[in-house]
Image (cartoon, grey):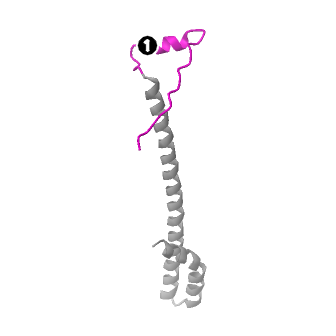
Amino acid sequence: MPLSFEVVPVQPPSPDGFLDRLRNRPHLPVVSADTRTLVRALSGALIVVLIGAASVVYLQSGQIDTLKSCLSGVQTAFSDFLGDDYDHALTVLYSVQTDCDNAYALF
């Protein structure tokens, strides 16, 4: 499907001529209304992509925190088990069971 863009009319020069002076600077590229519209559309698309990426990063950071909590609890329980503290090992495993279930669901 071909893309179509709306042409936005250029604003008239300002009374003090500032916009005219800015438009006539030799080192600035000449940009047509179609190009400006395309740049605006691409900028909007880029914003949507960046918001999506930020959402994914936020979601993954939460998943990593859940996994870290699970693994930390398992490590503590394993140390308690090796130290013959079986009751505390079970208590620690029960306390991280939800995090471990959530981490397992990710795989």
Amino acid of disc 1: Arg
Residue 51 image offset from top left, x and y in percent = 52, 48
Q: What residue is shown with label 1?
A: 25
Q: Which residue occupies 60% across, 84% down?
A: 91
Compare residues 92 and 83 and report the one nearer the observer. Answer: 92
Residue 18 image offset from top left, x and y in percent = 54, 12
Q: Is residue 20 above or below residue 51?
A: above
Compare residues 9 and 1 and report the one nearer the observer. Answer: 1
Crowd band around label 1 with a 10 angstrom C-alpha radius: few (<14), some (14–19), many (20+): few
| Callout 1: SS | loop
Residue 15 image offset from top left, x and y in percent = 60, 9
Q: In the picture, which quadrant includes the N terminus?
A: top left
Q: In the picture, which quadrant includes the C terminus?
A: bottom left
* Majority secondary structure of magenta residues: loop
Reply yes or no: does residue 66 show up in magenta.
Answer: no
Which stretch did the figure color magenta? 1-30
Q: Is residue 81 above or below residue 99?
A: below
Residue 79 image offset from top left, x and y in percent = 49, 82
Q: Which residue occupies 55% across, 90% down?
A: 86
Q: Which residue occupies 52% across, 66% down?
A: 63
Residue 71 seen from this side: no
